[in-house]
Amino acid sequence: MLSTSTFARRVFHRSITRGIKCQAIRVAEFGDPEQLVEVEYDVPSPSAGNVLVKVEAAGVNPVEIYIRRGKYGKLPELPYTPGTEGAGTVAEIGAGVKGLKVGDRVFLTDTVSGHGTYAQYCLSPSSGVHRLPDNSSLEIGASIGIAYRTAWRALFLKSKMKKGELVLVHGASGGVGMACLQLGKDFGARMIGTAGSPEGMEFVKSLGAEEAFDHTSAEYMKELKEYSPSGYSLILSMRAHTNLGKDTVLVANGGKILIVGAQGSSTIIPRRLMSKEASIQGLMTWNFTEAETKQFVDFISEKLKTEKIIPCVEKKYKLSDAKDAHVHINRNAASKGKVLLEPWSS
């Protein structure tokens, strides 16, 4: 039975959200950034097991670009609101939801299909809504759900990273790359990162990288091989369509290449892997189990509470400028951390 105070909170909040409009980005057709259109629509209602969240900040990620283009293995039905990563406050809870209450500060690791975080309000299954530590800002919360969860899964679940291991992170100045460097350094691995500008390389070093390299340089491969002639025991590739062939040269004997992101095909020479007895493995964030997500949330919440891990935010956009955020991520080789949307910013 609901307590009087809980019942009153739910009824009161329902009375101020039902029938009102909110702003959201909707995609009616797969295609270019112009498909990201700001619209006004009714605040959705959470069904059983779901939570309505007032979104204060939303993470923008390359995967949302792939989905918007229609070039991804798992696509939503049209029209849809993009976004999985975000943070805000619980606005309303559906029947059967436990452990959350209206007003809780939360971060998200999942949303109901079609009702993503590129909006002032989003719907999430209760399993994808997690309390944000009191000392963490909503901006930090909005940087966690995809970037750090992907990095954690890549380093600890898939790669079984070891202390002292030499790890190369391609595109280390972006959101997932940043997370890999911070988590790896905190764990005790030797982290090496690449970036596309002098500023990006300085940023990579500031995150704890032992060394940083410019992946736009003609001497890039030579420098990486000279730094570690025996190769890298673990390589994380954010753009495998560009780097995979090179990675087979750089990987150490018995090493592993983990594909975190790719936008197209790649050609490799299999004998390079055979001679080194090295392996290639893919990773897909959406394959997280509920148990893995709980394990990640417990892990990252402790890191946030102790401030051992603090995400860096590079740039923030208004909701109406979502298309500019996509262009920025797709074109900017000099990224320095996360890109966010602020749905309530005017």
Image (cartoon, grey):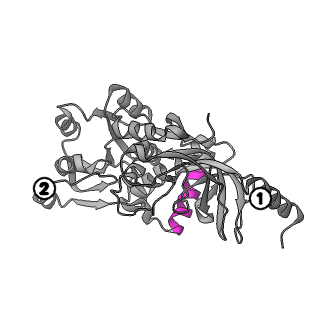
Where's residue 64, x and y in %? 42, 51
Q: Which mark is residue 272?
A: 2
At a point 33% along the width and 56% down the height, the residue shown is 71
Taking depth in this image into account, of 211 and 240 the one nearest to the observer is: 240
In the rendered image, residue 290, in percent from the top left (x then y), is placed at 53, 68
Q: Amino acid at mark 1?
A: Arg
Bin the neighbour count of mark 2 within 10 Å (Cα to Cα): few under 14, some 14-19, many 20 and up.
some
Q: Nearer the viewer, mark 1 or mark 2?
A: 1
Relative image position of residue 337 (x, y in whole percent): 45, 37
Q: Nearest the camera: 308 or 330?
A: 330
Q: Quadrant of the C terminus?
A: top right
Under circle 2, the secondary element is: helix
- Residue corresponding to mark 1: 14
Give x and y (percent) for residue 234.
Answer: 30, 52
Q: Is residue 15 magenta?
A: no
Visible in this render: residue 223?
yes
Relative vertical location of residue 201 with respect to residue 139 in this rendering, above or below = above
Q: CA distance from mark 1 to mark 2?
A: 61 Å
